[in-house]
Amino acid sequence: MTPRIFAFLCLLPLAIFSLAFLALPLVQLFAGAVEGDLGWGIYLEILRTPRYLSTLWQTVVISILVTVAALSVSTTAGLFLARHRFWGRGLLLSILTLPLAFPGVVVGFMIILLAGRQGLINDLTPGRVVFAYSSVGLFLGYLYFSIPRVLLTVMAAVEKLDPALEEAARTLGARPVAILRDVLLPGLAPALVASGAIAFATAMGAFGTAFTLATDIDVLPMVIYTEFTLSANIAMASALSILLGLVTWALLLWARSFAGATVAGGG
Amino acid sequence: MRIGFFIQLTVTLLAAAFLIVPAIQSILAGLTVNYFRGLSSGLTLKWVFEVWDLYADSILLSLWLALGCLVATLIIGVPAAYGLARNPGRTSRVLEEFVSLPLAVPGLALALALLQLYGTMKGFRMSAMFILVGHILYTLPFMIRSVLAVMAAMDLKTLEESAATLGAPPWRTFIDIVVPNAMPGILAGALTVVTLSIGEFNLTWMLHTPLLKTLPVGLADSYASMRLEIASAYTLVFFIMIVPLLTAMQWASNRLSRINP
């Protein structure tokens, strides 16, 4: 057996598995979307139905807000943690990356504990303050799982920045705000774009968090779920999943051209 | 400068508090006799035992699935990474990109695709194998990438040529030389696979059957229908399983990026 043939054989299990459980199911998903009465018109139907349009709009808006918030918080914290050494830094870093392994359902439960009916905020404040099940709760849930993802990418980028540039700017008399604006942020820009795209794509596709919070605003994954299970509208569920999948896939592909990292997991 | 420092410190501390406070609450709630009355009602392990009575099956199923997923991703992923590293080129890039789709496409969409193709094959659909396939699909790219990162830095050609000169067939070279050298990548990949499999919800929720609930599916169930103490105690059990795994995973990945920057 020549090395060439052996290397080819090594790829065989992967090829068989991917064909059976990735390629063929995806083909079926695309076929399933146009199998209904509407045919290809199903995609037009998405644009014609106010409920789907408003869902799309709400999902995009909340994902943008979460991305902006996560970028601001994580860049601030990332710069701070990468540039300072102090007692308890390791602990802070562990806390800030802990939710990486939490499934979306657990994140949803964390928000219920903070802002639900028996939640901390309702206990500490006079009157009834319950917002876990509103759009604010959903926003906080998405922020919860986005902070660690963005933080890791930003910190990796900060460590690669040349500290000499910052020192030079300081020596030349630049004020901290100017250093941030003219030196740090431009240097971090590729990492910020990449991690922003990751945060946005994850928020778009997050299912577990919305599922647990059972919120009063509709997001795309929840609508796909209800179309499939409650309405048995398989064609529409497929068409919406294809739309969602294409958007997140294209975004992440674009993000990777800025920075190599891919961070695990869905909300 | 000092003001900037304090703003940064405050944001960092607030973010950490936002993430850790509800986790601590859930740990306390799972150990408190009556959460509504507070800690003064006393501490107990009663809820943890009750979780075990109610959900032992789902916890064990998750462990079995994680193990099965690990074995399958090792068998498929490690040789595949070698095949990809050995034939760098356009075809390999496209193949790698394709099998990495589950990283980018939401689990819900993948689950719908699997359900539409295999939903009618009842024997397969109703078995734990169906969930296992979903988990393998989702974790395989992590294994391949982790191993590929190490192999890409190895001088495979020279290693192989020396082994071939000494009379070793290609499969011996792979087992005796390539795999031991790729161990840091395999370890990091293995820990990632197990951690992700135990926590996977988005795919599993669609693929599971009423008789086959995994740990996160059981969590969703307890959040919806159990009292807060039981839901919290179950979350505590999940934390106890996942936190050491996550720590080990981060250690292995950091070690990997130091060996192979």
Image (cartoon, rainbow, N blue to C red):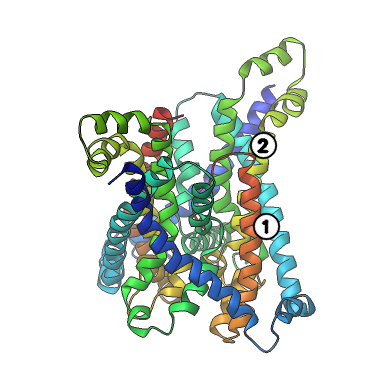
Please tell me whether residue A1 is drawn above or below residue B173 in the rendered image.
Answer: below
Residue A212 falls left or right of residue B157 = right
Other-residue count near label 1 (Cα within 10 Å), few / some / many at <14 / 14–19 / ≥20: many
- In terms of sequence position, does the residue under pointer 2 or pointer 1 come before the other? 1
Question: Mark 2 — residue?
Answer: A190
Chain holding disc 1: A
Chain holding disc 2: A
Residue B189 falls left or right of residue A154 = left
Amino acid type at circle 2 is Pro
Residue A178 falls left or right of residue A229 = right
Residue A144 point in image, percent of width and height: 56, 52
Q: Residue at x 71, y 71 (%)?
A: A55
Q: Residue at x 79, y 79 (%)?
A: A48
Where on the picture, by quarter, is residue B5? top right
SS class, disc 1:
helix
**Along the viewing direction, whichever of A107 and A164 lies nearer the viewer:** A164
Residue A28 point in image, percent of width and height: 54, 76
Nearest-to-viewer mark from 2 and 1: 2
Q: Residue at x 43, y 50 (%)?
A: B142
Residue A267 point in image, percent of width and height: 53, 59
Residue A1 point in image, percent of width and height: 27, 47
Mark 2 to mark 1 CA distance (whole Å): 20 Å
SS class, disc 2:
helix
Asked whether the residues under marks 2 and 1 belong to the same chain, the reply is yes
**Along the viewing direction, whichever of A52 and B160 lies nearer the viewer:** B160
Question: Mark 1 — residue?
Answer: A63
Amino acid type at circle 1 is Ser
As drawn, the residue found furthest toward the left would be B167
**Along the viewing direction, whichever of A90 and B255 lies nearer the viewer:** B255
In this rendering, the count of numbered labels is: 2
